[in-house]
Image (cartoon, rainbow, N blue to C red):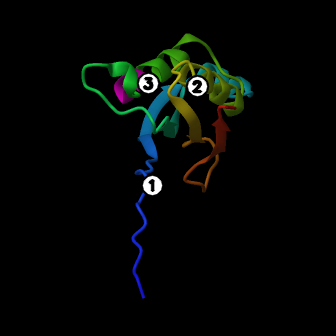
């Protein structure tokens, strides 16, 4: 019996993700009058999946998602205006992150930390994917 070796034609498959964990900002958010008068703490957890076919290159920063730049953009969004709903804020964050063409999917978890007694937090989780 003859052994036939098949050539392995599979290439490596990557999933590349940038994570921002437990970013806490004091922001103006909420529908109630008292929420419009006083900023409250919101925790942000964000996972950004990128195009795995693009190899990271330190000479070309367009090949990566810069987490510091992303945090600065989120901070700017939250400082510019009052958001009535966490859902509105999430959509604004999606808009800024998806400006980068290498971004394929974004998962957000936004939590108000001090709004409901006897809870650690209340919030939303939303995932949005770019259509190919």
On the rendered structure, is 5 left or right of 79?
A: left
Disc 3 marks which residue?
Answer: 70
Instruction: Classify 10 Å Cα crowding around label 2: few (below 14), some (14-19), many (20 and above).
Output: many
Please state which of the two labelled residues, at mark 3 or mark 1, is closer to the viewer: 1
Quadrant into which the N terminus falls: bottom left
Disc 3 to disc 1, C-alpha distance: 34 Å
Furthest residue in direction front, as rendered: 1
Image coordinates for residue 75, horizontal then vertical, percent: 46, 21
Disc 2 marks which residue?
Answer: 93
Q: Residue at x 33, y 20 (%)?
A: 61
Q: Which span of residues is magenta-colored?
A: 66-71
Q: Residue at x 64, y 30 (%)?
A: 90
Measured along the vertical axis of the image, is residue 85 above or below residue 3?
A: above
Image coordinates for residue 15, horizontal then vertical, percent: 46, 47
Instruction: Classify 10 Å Cα crowding around label 3: few (below 14), some (14-19), many (20 and above).
Output: some
Of marks 2 and 3, which one's residue comes earlier in the chain? Answer: 3
On the rendered structure, is 53 left or right of 123?
A: left
């Amino acid at each position: 019996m003859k052994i036939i070796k098949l050539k392995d034609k599979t290439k490596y498959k990557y999933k590349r993700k940038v994570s921002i964990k437990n970013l806490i900002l004091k922001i103006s958010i909420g529908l109630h009058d008292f929420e419009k008068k006083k900023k409250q703490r919101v925790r942000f957890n964000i996972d950004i999946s990128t195009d795995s076919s693009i190899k990271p290159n330190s000479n070309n920063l367009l090949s990566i998602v810069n987490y510091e730049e992303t945090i600065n953009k989120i901070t700017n969004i939250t400082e510019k205006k009052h958001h009535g709903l966490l859902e509105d804020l999430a959509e604004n964050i999606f808009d800024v992150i998806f400006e980068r063409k290498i971004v394929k999917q974004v998962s957000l978890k936004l939590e108000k930390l001090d709004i409901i007694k006897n809870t650690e937090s209340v919030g939303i989780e939303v995932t949005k994917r770019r259509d190919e």
